[in-house]
Image (cartoon, grey):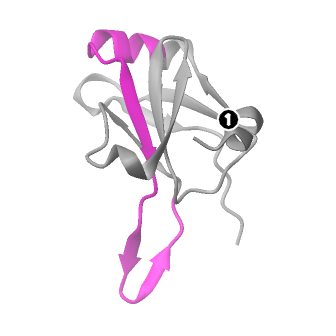
Amino acid sequence: MDLNLKTVMKINITQQAMKFLQKANKQEFYIERLVVTQCCIPIATPPTVRKGSPRKPENFYVFEVDGITVYYDRNLICKAEITVDAQGSGFSKGLLVTDWVIKY
């Protein structure tokens, strides 16, 4: 882990997201780059958040936040602070990065 990144990047997990993880019985999640190609033009999207650990953990930075292991994709830009929250309800409930801004 790059010590610089760990000292400059803060990951917040909301109470709603913590409850979602507890209910799913998960102690880890990963934030990864999502590449969407429509026709021949790549579309900029916020990163995805998935429960569990990534298939290739060596491609991620690892953070510990309130007892939760967070894997952050090395291909994403490093932000000073990001917030992970839960959204949706029932079967469509999931995690997302709420403060990711895409500028065109």
Q: Which amino acid does the dot numbered 1 rest on?
A: Lys
Q: Is residue 55 magenta?
A: no
- Residues rendered magenta in the picture: 18-45
Q: Position of residue 34 (x, y in %)?
A: 42, 59
Q: Is residue 31 covered in magenta?
A: yes
Image point (53%, 22%), residue name: 64
| Residue reaching furthest to the bottom | 40
Q: Residue at the spot x=42%, y=10% of the render?
A: 19
- In this picture, residue 97 sits left or right of residue 50: right
Q: Quarter of the image for the C terminus: give it.
A: bottom right
Return the x and y of residue 90 as percentages of the image width and height: 26, 23
Residue 9: give x, y in percent of width and height. 71, 37
| Location of residue 53 with respect to 38 vertically, above or below | above
Q: Nearer the viewer, residue 78 or 48?
A: 78
- Say whether residue 44 is left or right of residue 52: right
Label 1 belongs to which residue?
Answer: 6
x and y percent of residue 54 in the render? 31, 42
